[in-house]
Amino acid sequence: MRIDRTHRAWATATIIALVFASIVYIAYAVRSPGGPRGGTALGLTFGIAGYALMLYAGLLGARKKVPVWRIGRAQTWMRGHLWLGLLSFPLILFHGGFAFRGPLTAVLMILFFIVIVSGVAGAAFQHYLPRIMLSEVPMETIYEEIPHVREQLRDEADELVMAGVEAEYDDKVMLREMYQEKIRPFLETPDKPGAEPPAEIFDSLRVVIPAAFHPVLDDLENICEEERQLNRQIRLYRWLHAWLLIHVPSSIALLVLGGVHAVMALRY
Amino acid sequence: MPGRSRTTKKLAQRIDLNYFKRLYAIPSWRRRLSFGLVLVGLLWLGWEALSGKQRPYNAGPVSHAHALLTRNCTACHVAQAVFGRKVTDQACLTCHDAPAHQTAQTFTPVCMDCHVEHQGSPRLASTRDASCTQCHRDLKTDGKPAGYVTAIASFDGQHPEFAPLRPGHTDPGTVRLNHQVHLKKDLRGPNGTLVQVKCADCHPREQADIVPVNFEKHCLSCHPLQFDKRFVESVPHKKPDVEREFMTAKFTEYIGAHPEEVRTADPGDPRTMRPPLPPARNAAEWIARRIDDSERLLWRKTCKECHTLNFGPGSSLPEIPKAAIPAVWMPHAEFGHRAHQMVNCAECHAGATKSQETSDILLPGIQTCRTCHRSGADFADARCSECHLYHDWSKEKKIEGKFTLLGF
């Protein structure tokens, strides 16, 4: 999701809420005889508000599982996830008075820190990488379809080379040898380092191979380019989604253990 | 680069219609890691619960004094609430008495308001200023006069000058002492040697703090109370009647051992300007003359150096007012010289080297303390609890211990 001017209202509301919460916290921290603590009325209020925002942010996952639910637009949920999730962090810091000395609270704060950092990094990736993808991968396909598409590219290239073209026998042999040696390995294992044929190979082949084969060479070059772009897409996709391997598990653990903390803290 | 020629069929074949049925690497690992991380967390909590430990839920390390209660939460968390167990004052009062602060106070906080546990604080008595200023910022009493400044916000902000240094306060001491003279070079010291008196010679520190000046310990060696050349010892530093009794006993003992002196001519006493007299008629007259000489010396010179002597009508013995040197100048605060021993005395008691009058109060003012004690990480602590006690420990009651050694 791009963070553009459509986020302005969310950002403004978040900043206003943060400023208000900060003012309340400072007044409370200065005047509170025992110092700010999670167990006081205001400390609990900060904790409940922070955890509620965390739960809301966590519900984005559920919302994505059932996209047909008519409970607000996905974009609105995403913006809320981003900004309210971010707001929950200072609220939880206010809740604990910037201290997390107990084992469980320390674990929770470490998880929370990881969630926030990975989330911010993810938001940055989601902001910049789609534009890069758009300009550098015009042949983009559905990520999960890539292995299937690659199979077809291989078949298509094989067919092109084997198809009958009016030419001398030697020229046909030369083309097939060149294909087997330089291009087929790349189509077989496109993500293997060093497998990609150099771009200038097609220009040099056009010099030595008769013009009848040039349309075949053009198509092969096009297939290689598509493979290159699919490689690039895979790399960008990993950047776009790998952060979720940290963000999502940490978030779920945070919500579950945070619930345990809430119950046990109220008990004592 | 020209595009390849592709049929509609070929393009349609590019789409694998079942792709969404398979879980690919990133979503798959996301699911596994989510499950695994939650499982690890719950296993940890479950393991601690099965071991009977509540450690994960500990809100933080308890203070040093309560360290032995770390594994016994219910020692403090005693009160059964609707959900769980809470700490009340009763739990604290099991082991500690907490005498009231003031009889006129309008508000009494609960123990935990000021003594916050689970913060790893080494000393629970080191409370935050807000504990005090919640009342003293705008002090209200239950109708009785406050007796104190009613608006105190912090030590380095709104705190009055120390009471002895405020206008109208004087040193109640009656002993004449000139600090400037005592700090001069080459004073005649014990046995006639020349000395340079140092602060600690008269104000030594014993154990925790400086002890009050004591004549026998700190003055006598330079200021002997010699009363007659026949004796090297001094009269006791007591009331005049005790001194007279002491001298009478000494002279009686002496004349018993030297009866021939009764009949010798009395040469007079240059110290008291007494002229010569004929020999005494008997031992009693000789003793009376010696006591008269000694008392003239003591009352007119030796004692008068420091004390004001009042002779009542018809009384031969003077009245000496009590020294009245305050042992504690600030009764509502605590101060330890030991903690400040690295600082030269004159840095805080700057007036001592020039003071000539007893009435000079040589306590450092609040600004001197604020040189080091002020808010900020780079300064010495300036919290109220550094100097003041909340509980009136003079009213402390004895606690009957209830715990057993193995009970912890």
Image: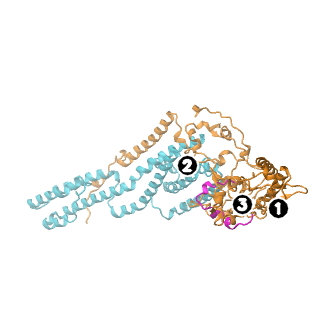
Chain colours: A cyan, B orange
Left/right of residue B352 with respect to residue A243 in the rendered view = right
Q: Which residue is mark 1?
A: B276
Q: Using the image as rendered, state which of residue B140 and residue A166 is in the foreground.
A: B140
Q: Residues under labels 1 and 3: Cα distance?
A: 57 Å
* Letter of the chain that mark 1 sits on in the rendering: B
Left/right of residue B56 with respect to residue B360 in the rendered view = left
| Residue B352 counted in the magenta span | yes
Q: Which residue is mark 3?
A: B162
Percent coordinates x, y for residue A3 in the rendering: 47, 62
Going from the N terminus, do you reach mark 1 or mark 3 first?
3
Q: Amino acid at mark 2?
A: Tyr
* Pointer 1 local density, CA inside 10 Å: few below 14, some 14–19, many at least 20: few
Q: Are marks 1 and 3 in contact (CB under 8 Å)?
A: no
Q: Are marks 3 and 2 in contact (CB under 8 Å)?
A: no
Q: Which residue is mark 2?
A: A51
Percent coordinates x, y for residue B190 in the rendering: 65, 58
Is the same chain shared between marks 1 and 2? Answer: no
